Image (spheres, helix red, strand yellow):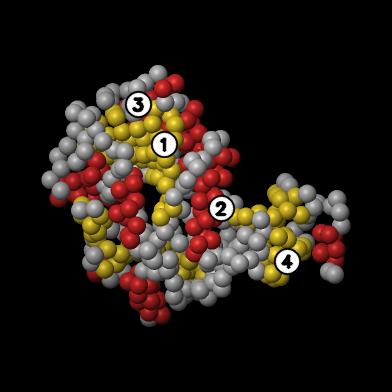
């Protein structure tokens, strides 16, 4: 037995970085790490599967929580499979390729439940349905590639670092996106990539792939995509959902409880290029969309104009600031849909929503922990959760898209 393992096995001693120990992974936690216990301490194991028996090395310790990596899978879980990507474990993009797809879906539902219990402090709904991705591979219509011009590397960041992993292929990228990566790599070998470009954003649509910053003349062209009968234009500077095969289902769920009466207003917060703005404008007398990204706001205006919808306006502003300036002057706001980035809604946004007290709220989230944090504030202000549904927009990762519907309770004093 090595000295580090002997030190780890002695009872009563705290775990230290470098120690090796044998663990059984119990379940997957929010953040995608496996939960295990040793010597009375919590150990979080990267890239593990529930039920794995592993030999792990402690990489760091924070308080009574140790973070570990797998040295050897002694007895694999039934949920474990061989990762498809040759860069898995180094590349920071995917962290669930070691799980069967069924195990991925189950883990994501449990992550949502865990966040609702621990963070929102509410008992989750008895059922949280999850809609699987029609394709578990080759689904990503968007990618962000890192460029190291000194070492001539192009790919993704290495897990937990800002070092670039040189990536020749990406099995989760849509075919047209992967083809664009290979073309950029050819340009790099020829010395034709700009040396001051350290990051590239690529997004696919009906007209190919747009790139920001552009390298060739065709890279700056805008893209478009039809969702539930509406057509949306966008480019690589704008956010647009990465899994286009699930867009119809996600949009339908986000709008499921959006019904307005005469003269009523709906707000679309963090509205992007107007994915929800356009259908909301067909259901409410007035819609106000708020988006901080100027190119996305401009595309939203163009998309509304293309659809000949004149009852919606688009405000270019951070959402919290706009609500702080306008929430007291808005009247008859019956419905609010918000789709914030991974960090969730900022404090001023949640306060503004509470001041407006809409009858119903639809919260679309890509992070269960920040969703639960914001739900807790809304619940404390008099809202209740009607339903929660998940969509596997990000197969092979721990990330999951969630739609929560809320309504005012009787104790709030409103009907």
Q: Which of the 4 image quarters holds residue 353?
A: top left
Answer above or below: position of 262 versus 150: above
**Residue topped by disc 3:** 356
- Contact, CB < 8 Å: mark 4 with mark 3? no
**Residue topped by disc 1:** 386
- Name the residue rendered at 15%, 43% in the picture: 309
Distance between the Cα atoms at labels 4 and 1?
Answer: 43 Å
Label whose residue precedes the other's in the sequence (4 or 1): 4
Q: Position of residue 374 (x, y in %)?
A: 47, 36
Label whose residue precedes the other's in the sequence (3 or 1): 3
Distance between the Cα atoms at labels 3 and 1?
Answer: 19 Å
Query: Is residue 328 visible in the rendered structure shown here?
Result: yes
**Residue topped by disc 4:** 55
Label whose residue precedes the other's in the sequence (4 or 3): 4
**Residue topped by disc 2:** 31
Characterize the local packing of mark 4: few (<14), some (14-19) or many (20 or more) Cα atoms within 10 angstroms: some
């Amino acid at each position: 037995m090595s000295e580090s393992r002997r030190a780890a096995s002695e009872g009563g001693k705290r775990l230290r970085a470098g120690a090796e120990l044998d663990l059984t992974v119990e379940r997957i936690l929010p953040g995608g790490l496996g939960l295990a216990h040793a010597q009375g301490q919590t150990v979080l194991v990267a890239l593990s599967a529930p039920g794995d028996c592993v030999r792990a090395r402690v990489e760091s310790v924070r308080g009574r929580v140790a973070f570990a990596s797998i040295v050897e899978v002694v007895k694999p879980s039934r949920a474990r499979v061989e990762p498809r990507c040759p860069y898995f474990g180094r590349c920071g993009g995917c962290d669930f390729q070691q799980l069967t797809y069924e195990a991925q879906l189950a883990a994501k539902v449990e992550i949502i439940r865990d966040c609702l219990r621990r963070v929102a402090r509410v008992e989750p709904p008895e059922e949280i349905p999850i809609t699987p991705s029609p394709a578990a591979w080759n689904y990503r219509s968007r990618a962000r590639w890192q460029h190291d011009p000194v070492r001539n590397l192009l790919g993704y960041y290495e897990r937990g670092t800002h070092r670039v992993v040189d990536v020749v292929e990406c099995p989760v990228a849509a075919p047209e996106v992967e083809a664009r990566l290979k073309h950029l790599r050819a340009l790099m070998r020829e010395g034709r990539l700009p040396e001051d470009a350290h990051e590239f954003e690529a997004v696919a649509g009906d007209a190919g792939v747009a790139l920001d910053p552009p390298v060739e003349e065709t890279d700056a062209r805008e893209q478009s995509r039809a969702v539930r009968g509406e057509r949306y234009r966008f480019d690589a500077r704008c956010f647009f959902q990465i899994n286009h095969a699930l867009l119809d289902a996600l949009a339908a769920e986000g709008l499921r409880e959006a019904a307005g009466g005469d003269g009523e207003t709906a707000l679309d917060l963090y509205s992007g290029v107007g994915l929800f703005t356009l259908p909301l404008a067909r259901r409410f007398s007035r819609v106000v969309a708020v988006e901080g990204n100027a190119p996305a706001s401009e595309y939203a205006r163009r998309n509304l104009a293309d659809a000949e919808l004149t009852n919606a306006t688009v405000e270019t502003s951070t959402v919290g600031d706009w609500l702080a300036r306008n929430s007291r002057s808005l009247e008859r706001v019956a419905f609010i849909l918000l789709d914030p980035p991974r960090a969730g809604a900022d404090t001023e946004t949640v306060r503004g929503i509470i001041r407006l007290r809409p009858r119903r709220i639809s919260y679309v989230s890509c992070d269960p922990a920040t969703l639960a944090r914001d739900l807790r504030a809304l619940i404390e202000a008099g809202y209740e959760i009607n339903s929660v549904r998940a969509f596997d927009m990000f197969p092979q990762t721990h990330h999951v898209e969630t739609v929560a519907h809320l309504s005012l309770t009787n104790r709030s004093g409103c009907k």
